[in-house]
Image (cartoon, grey):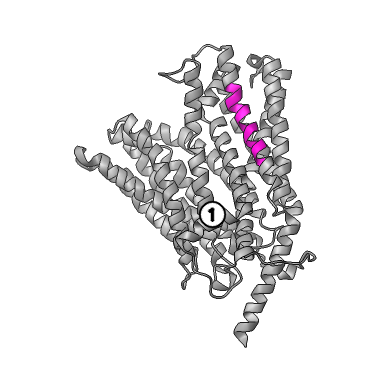
Amino acid sequence: METTVKKVEIPKESRYRRAKTWQIGAFALNNSATNIFLYLMMFVSYYATGVVGLGTVIVSTLITMSRIWDGVTDPIIGLWIDKTDGKFGKFRPFMILGWVVMTIITLLMFFTTHLVPQNLRLIYFILLYLVYIVGYTFQTACTKAGQTVLTNDPQQRPLFSTFDMSYTSLLFAGAAVYVSNYMVPKHGGFTESFFHEFVITVVIIAGIMTALAVIGLWEKDRTENFGTGGVQQQIKLKDMFNIIKGNRPLQMLIVAASTDKLAATVSSNSIVMVMLFGIVIGDFGVFGSISAITMIPVLILIQIGTRYARKFGSKKALVVSTWMCIALYTAMFLLLWLGDPTQIRMTDMNAMSIAFISLYILATGVRNVSGGIVIPMIPDITDYEVYKNDLYAPGVMGTIFSFVDKMISSLGQTVIGILLAYIGFKEVFPSVDTPPSTAIFWVTMFLFVGMMILGWVASLIAMKFYELDDKRMAEIQTELADRRDAKKAAAEQ
């Protein structure tokens, strides 16, 4: 039953449990550690087919089906996290265990699968891959859930996104250079030695990042910081369904984030990039060049966006950045439709090139802010559940969110496949050698721009029913602070 709380003034800073800036920056590396493993596994199909000798269809099917296993394990592991409260806290054991499991599995996978007898390789590979996903979920679940103990200041929580999005941008840009400019030339392609060095490098870097993340959370990962402090209500399986049913902010955030994720999965798909740059624009090299120059502007826009979120609240930042995304993507569509996209070249800075590159950089940066600001909103809905039902379930909350998000976003490839089949590409996908046509242009525009705008419209509608703005969160945190004080006073009597 929901507790009635009278309107209060925004609480003084002393009522908040704040973290030091370095602690937030260090903990954000937990997401970077798992992203490094994620980047490694983007190449697993090359190892499975080129080194191990498994078929491309089998490997593609396995990787697609693994998303279902990934989604199913999310709530189970979230429930396990919520039941944990030991000497080393709630989250740190799962962060360490996640890195250990992924390290062992990736070393076994890339060093031994090709040595297993031929008739057992597929089963061996599948078993390792499924265990890897469990380890991956152990650590990723803590990224969302651990923020609840790190800080409960609505103005400080968006700072996590500043670090996280900056790390992610630098990580993937650096990793692309590392693989394409260093590793591939050194090893002559995706060879056995390539994967051996790649795995060892990933394991070491991810281990360092995980250690720093654990240190960042060390001081905060304690019982007194779980919910309203003290003994917590035990989470049961049925509570997961009750949370989804009764937590309106969770429902609305899932709608906003999952529709955006589905749209982004489609819009940024490599096939769509080939169609946009290789066919509509007519020079796929523009994609590589424009991607390289977006990094610094994107980092600057991330700083601006998260500062805005810290000042005005995450909800308002999400709404404002979403409207900006709609405007920028609409402008890109009009430019490509009414202008001549074949004039866009990095070697010829004509008006068309300058306009498209400027819009693309701005749109990419603002889109990163819109997508990244969701993560610090998850601890807000976790605190709302504590306020409403006195139920502290950060693990379940984060993994419920992930489960729905993964299931919906996995439809991205299906959307692309259906639309391309409709215009005649039933056997093979369009390539840079495919001649341009009106049908390709409009399908490309829908996949690149239309899907994103539909996702953003859904987000704006969902945010109309999302009550957790900065003022509402201040009220909730005041009430939770009063409850913690009451529990502490009762325990001292």
Residue furthest to the right in view is 9
Which quadrant: the C terminus? bottom right
Q: Residue furthest front?
A: 1
Q: In terms of depth relative to the viewer, which is nearer, 12 or 457?
A: 457
Q: Please identify the residue farthest to the bottom as the structure is shown.
A: 493
Relative to residue 260, is residue 327 drawn left or right?
right
Q: Main secondary structure of the magenta part?
A: helix
Q: Which residues are magenta?
A: 444-459
Q: Residue at x 69, y 39 (%)?
A: 322
Front residue of this view, candidates 158 and 175? 158
Residue assigned mark 1: 398
Q: Is residue 307 visible?
A: yes
Q: From this view, report whether residue 272 is shown above or below residue 208.
A: above
Query: Is 396 part of what is drawn in magenta?
Result: no
Indicate the position of residue 21 as horizontal and vertical percent values. 66, 60
Q: Which quadrant of the structure image shows residue 260?
A: top right
Q: Position of residue 30 (x, y in %)?
A: 52, 54
> How far across and down, in percent of the image, does residue 245 sit?
56, 54
Q: Is residue 303 visible?
A: no
For residue 446: magenta? Answer: yes
> What secondary structure is found at the residue carrying circle 1?
helix
Instruction: Determine whether, in the image, residue 213 is placed left or right of residue 166.
Output: left
